[in-house]
Amino acid sequence: MNAFIFPKWMNQLRPVLAVVLIGLPLYVIVVFAYGASPKTTDAGYAPTQPVTYSHALHAGELGIDCRYCHTGVEDAAHAAVPPTQTCLNCHKSIKADSDKLEAVRLSHETGLPIEWVRVHDLPDYVYFNHSAHVRRGIGCVSCHGRIDTMEVVYQAELLSMGWCLDCHRNARPWLRPSDQITEMTWTQEQATAAELEWIETYDVNPSTDCSTCHR
């Protein structure tokens, strides 16, 4: 009776099996580590824009509400990049001849939009609706960071699937009253009793189904 369960030629596969058993876990670890790294998720991404627009000045020092420029944030899926006319509402009379506004003036003269570079750019297979989040108590700062302190806008958060799911699984710490959505310094620790009551009674239970974001 043959004592061997497997044929002898399978001995030649031992080096291959060793590589698979050792290499496959290492491969998985490397792939997942790279997939979650800032280089892959673009955390810290800060492209050069055609106009040197300072959010620290406009949103911070001057206190301009986010919705003045990003008009669609409460009603549409996209926050909307402001048209040239929005800039000229102020800059027709304020520093109208500044060299920094050359691209704005050219856009106004030619009718061509300013080619802003998108900073927070999710993959095409991800669906994100700004209004759905803003209307349910998620503030701008939760995803975009302290925009009011940024001379150059950069991506402050990972915007990875895991990062989104952390909030969807426990949204309570991120909620705020609707009148505090654009307030960058508001925190639950300084909330009034009425604001905390609003958070407790407002029914926010985000879905974690795949089809919620992948449509």
Image (spheres, rainbow, N blue to C red):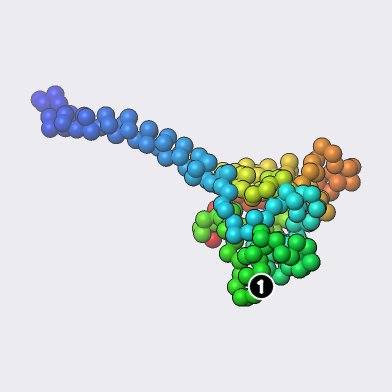
- Residue type at numbered disc 1: His
Q: Is residue 116 visible?
A: yes
Extreme residue in the left direction:
1
Characterize the local packing of mark 1: few (<14), some (14-19) or many (20 or more) Cα atoms within 10 angstroms.
Answer: some
> Left or right of 188: which side holds 151?
left
Q: Residue at x 16, y 31 (%)?
A: 12
Whether 129 is drawn above or below 85: the answer is above
- Give the tally of numbered discs: 1
Q: Is residue 165 visible?
A: no
In x, y percent, where is residue 6? 17, 31
Viewport quadrant of the C terminus: bottom right
Residue 1, by quadrant, is top left
Q: Residue at x 29, y 34 (%)?
A: 20
In x, y percent, where is residue 125? 51, 58
Element marked by disc 1: helix
Residue 25, by quadrant, is top left
In x, y percent, where is residue 130? 67, 58
Extreme residue in the right direction:
193
Residue 172, by quadrant, is top right
In x, y percent, where is residue 132? 69, 58
The residue under label 1 is 108
Closest to the observer, 214 or 115: 115
Whether 110 is drawn above or below 159: the answer is below
